Image (cartoon, helix red, strand yellow):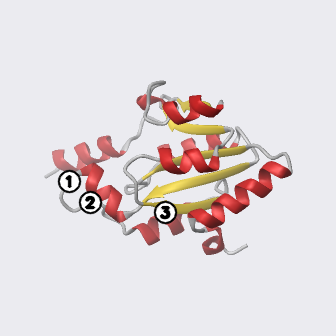
Amino acid sequence: MNHKEKIKSLDEILQIAAEAKKEGKKIVTTNGSFDLFHAGHIDLLKKAKERGDLLIVGVNSDKSVKEYKKKPGRPIIPDKYRAELLAAIMYVDYVFLFDDLIPNSWLEKIRPDVHANSAEYGTKCVETEVLDQYGGELFLVPKEDIPLSTSLIEEKIKAEK
């Protein structure tokens, strides 16, 4: 499959997820802007994929990144290219863009078995409410393995100016 074929609409993702569930597959989701992509993101995706059969990644659209990052010039990379970058990664099965500030509306529809998040967001992250409603598992990926984050990269860039 060409990596661009892994990029789907939410409606297509819902169909794929429903079929995977019928086949008894374990669905894992994660999400983010993935605007300054780094090795920490790869680690998150790898560990998320290890928790199930199908890894679906929700990518914040340009519209939602502008709203929640509230930083001039963000996103740096347009959503189309961020989606393509993620789709090219071997751990990722499918990618879709979403406009919401938080993933709860689509989590409620997909109802993954596991939702992976960086441990920095903790057990009381915004996704917890939806996951608890239907019995989904929250998997927190520790950052100590690869101490990189977008904010650390931003700080380094600012310090070098």
- 7 w.r.t. 49: above or below: below
Would residue 113 be visible to someone looking at this image?
A: yes
Give the percent coordinates (x, y) of residue 37. Answer: 43, 55
State yes or no: discs 1 and 2 in contact (Cβ < 8 Å): yes
Helix, strand or loop under label 3: strand
Give the label on residue 92, or none: none
What is the three-letter code of the residue carrying label 3? Answer: Leu
- 34 w.r.t. 79: above or below: above
Other-residue count near label 2 (Cα within 10 Å), few / some / many at <14 / 14–19 / ≥20: some
Furthest residue toward left: 161
Q: Which residue, given by chain and number where applicable, does mark 2 sit on? A: 74
User: Which residue is drawn at the image coordinates 32% and 63% (left, top)?
Assistant: 63
In three-dimensional space, the C-alpha distance between marks 1 and 3, rounded to whole angstroms, equals: 20 Å
Q: Which residue, given by chain and number where applicable, does mark 1 sit on? A: 71
Give the label on residue 97, or none: 3
80 relative position to 12: left or right: left
Furthest residue toward top: 123
Helix, strand or loop under label 1: loop
The mark nearer the N terminus, 3 or 2, is 2
For the residue pair 4 and 98, the one nearer the viewer reads as: 98
In three-dimensional space, the C-alpha distance between marks 1 and 2, rounded to whole angstroms, equals: 6 Å
What is the three-letter code of the residue carrying label 2? Answer: Arg
The mark nearer the N terminus, 1 or 3, is 1
User: Which residue is drawn at the image coordinates 65% and 73% (left, top)?
Assistant: 5
Furthest residue toward right: 23
User: Which residue is drawn at the image coordinates 57% and 68% (left, top)?
Assistant: 9
What is the three-letter code of the residue carrying label 1? Answer: Lys
Quadrant that contains the N terminus: bottom right
